[in-house]
Image: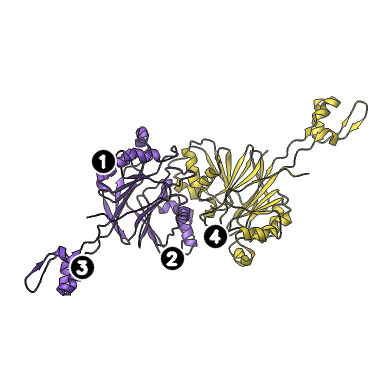
Chain colours: A purple, B yellow
Amino acid sequence: MRFELILLGTSGAAPTAARNCSAAMLRTDTTDVLIDCAENTQRQLLKAGMGMGKVSHILITHLHGDHYFGLAPLLSSLSMQGRTSPLSITSPLHLRPRLEALLELDKYPLRYALNFHTVHPDGSFQLPNIGDLEVFAFPLQHRNETNGYLLREKKRETNIRKEAITAYDLPWPAIKAIKAGGSHTLPNGTLIPNTDLVTQPPLPRSYAHCSDTIYFPELAGYVDGVDLLYHEATFLKDMAEDAARKGHSTAEDAARTALAAGVGQLVLGHYSTRYESSAGHEAEARAVFPNTVAADDLYRFSVPFRGR
Amino acid sequence: MRFELILLGTSGAAPTAARNCSAAMLRTDTTDVLIDCAENTQRQLLKAGMGMGKVSHILITHLHGDHYFGLAPLLSSLSMQGRTSPLSITSPLHLRPRLEALLELDKYPLRYALNFHTVHPDGSFQLPNIGDLEVFAFPLQHRNETNGYLLREKKRETNIRKEAITAYDLPWPAIKAIKAGGSHTLPNGTLIPNTDLVTQPPLPRSYAHCSDTIYFPELAGYVDGVDLLYHEATFLKDMAEDAARKGHSTAEDAARTALAAGVGQLVLGHYSTRYESSAGHEAEARAVFPNTVAADDLYRFSVPFRGR
């Protein structure tokens, strides 16, 4: 059962020859969610061998160009390719006015329904589910309204052991009660505890995406315990003042949040074009939070199930 | 003395993993002109090792996204990089309304002056010079208003042979007259013909850019005798009906225009994504006009001086 992140761009405000600007895809077996959509995201998707067929929702973190200038070309290509299934875009500020002239939406509507949703929460805020994922938006602290997003597998149903059904000849009402956590009493009065009757499903896996933000202590609460955390790391800590002034984080800032939140793994991106390599970011973050990877474009992170 | 074309994108309406959408740079020693600006043009420039420092004018052929969706990100990056010199954009329909919301031009003006010019001519129409280039716009026949552009070196001054100045002890008024084409009469009455006194400068080199168009016979007149012709070749001739219906050309169409116009070399691009290679386009065009190259991204064409 897949729960995978593909980073489509790891450069900051401007691209380099080697790095695209921000976009990421979270994939499960049935649901793909695109988060941010910088210029050239459609070509990054092609290079990653991915299509937009299973994407019904795009989540935009904020309306700076390096996070959404790829929308018009992508939406336009999807229409040319014959897409008919609706597409929803969620962002913290209204996007339609920025796209309608460019796409001439009123003159040439796309061949599929395009729905815009605006949300910028004060705290962690649950959005409607997307396929098999629960989705939450939470506030980041950047120069304009910016959302972080958390995506989590829905809780799986508890499974009754097949051998228990056979051995105890369990009728349907008993199965229902056991699935809800109940024990079972046999006709002879023996109590079979719930744990002997069921197998616990794996814990829901979760992913949080923190695009552009300064460090702030409350952020760890919003991403508490996620299996995988993407966090921007525009600068190294010797430029902490510039980072704060520009609304960005250092690699160490990202690692502090990862540590405080107790996440499984930390992934870095959104590097300033001043850095030729991200090795410094990785080293700086690992000193605080060892399980860190400073990603390059098209890196994939497959999230395993964690023990209970 | 450089006169060079760099093709930044050779895909048609949508990019592929291997091809960007349309953009091209024409370079001389002192002047760079960007023609069209698809999504991701800024990264193609980086890959080609080029900047925008010598670009004062961008020429947009038409307002379909695959020819201008890269403007907002490029203009935005230039501002972030600290550009202060003005930039002019010429297009056949007004571009500002499509960019102002996206760039928030009214709220956050760019750090340099951005000037929009609109022109869609009925015939060949001279625009103001750009640096050392004369520029002409001419109409193409596509689904919306579309300009072709022709760029030509200014005529160079005739040079007087240094040895003639010494040998005949030519005074300044005589030099002026000889430069203007006159002969020279020595004090002893001998007439020295102009051709013995001057060296003819090389002929101005020229480039024409035909982005999206159906075949039409008058086009050859607009690009008559250019040294280098870029012409779209979206389809092969077995799809001539689709080409015409969609406002595009076949490789053979492009070659017929090149032949009728007597151009030096033909360069093809803007291939439909249905073609994995452009080998078929090259073969089809060469059957009509042998000096054809079907370009891939980042191909460079250096134009030599032609004999008089």
For the residues labelled 1 and 3, the Cα–Cα distance comes to 44 Å
- Secondary structure, mark 1, is loop
Residue A296 as seen in the image, left or right of residue B275: left
Judging by the rendered image, the residue that carries numbered circle 3 is A161
Of circles 4 and 2, which is in front?
Answer: 4
At 48% across and 48% down in the image, what residue appears? B99
Asked if labels 3 and 4 touch by Cβ distance under 8 angstroms, the answer is: no
Judging by the rendered image, the residue that carries numbered circle 4 is B273
Tell if the residue under mark 3 belongs to the same chain as the one under mark 2: yes
Tell me the kind of residue under disc 1: Pro
Tell me the kind of residue under disc 3: Arg
For the residues labelled 2 and 1, the Cα–Cα distance comes to 43 Å
Q: How crowded is mark 2: few (under 14 residues within 10 Å), some or many (20 or more)?
A: few
Name the spot of residue A196 as percent of width and height, x first: 15, 65
| The N terminus of chain B lies in quadrant | top right
For the residues labelled 4 and 3, the Cα–Cα distance comes to 52 Å
Residue A74 as seen in the image, left or right of residue A135: right
For the residues labelled 4 and 1, the Cα–Cα distance comes to 49 Å
Asked if labels 2 and 3 touch by Cβ distance under 8 angstroms, the answer is: no
For the residues labelled 4 and 2, the Cα–Cα distance comes to 20 Å
Tell me the kind of residue under disc 2: Thr
For the residues labelled 3 and 2, the Cα–Cα distance comes to 42 Å
Tell me the kind of residue under disc 4: Thr
N-term mark: 3 or 2: 2
Judging by the rendered image, the residue that carries numbered circle 2 is A84
Q: Return the mark for residue A217.
A: 1
Name the spot of residue A192 as percent of width and height, x first: 11, 67
Given the image, what chain letter belongs to the residue carrying mark 2? A
Q: How crowded is mark 1: few (under 14 residues within 10 Å), some or many (20 or more)?
A: few
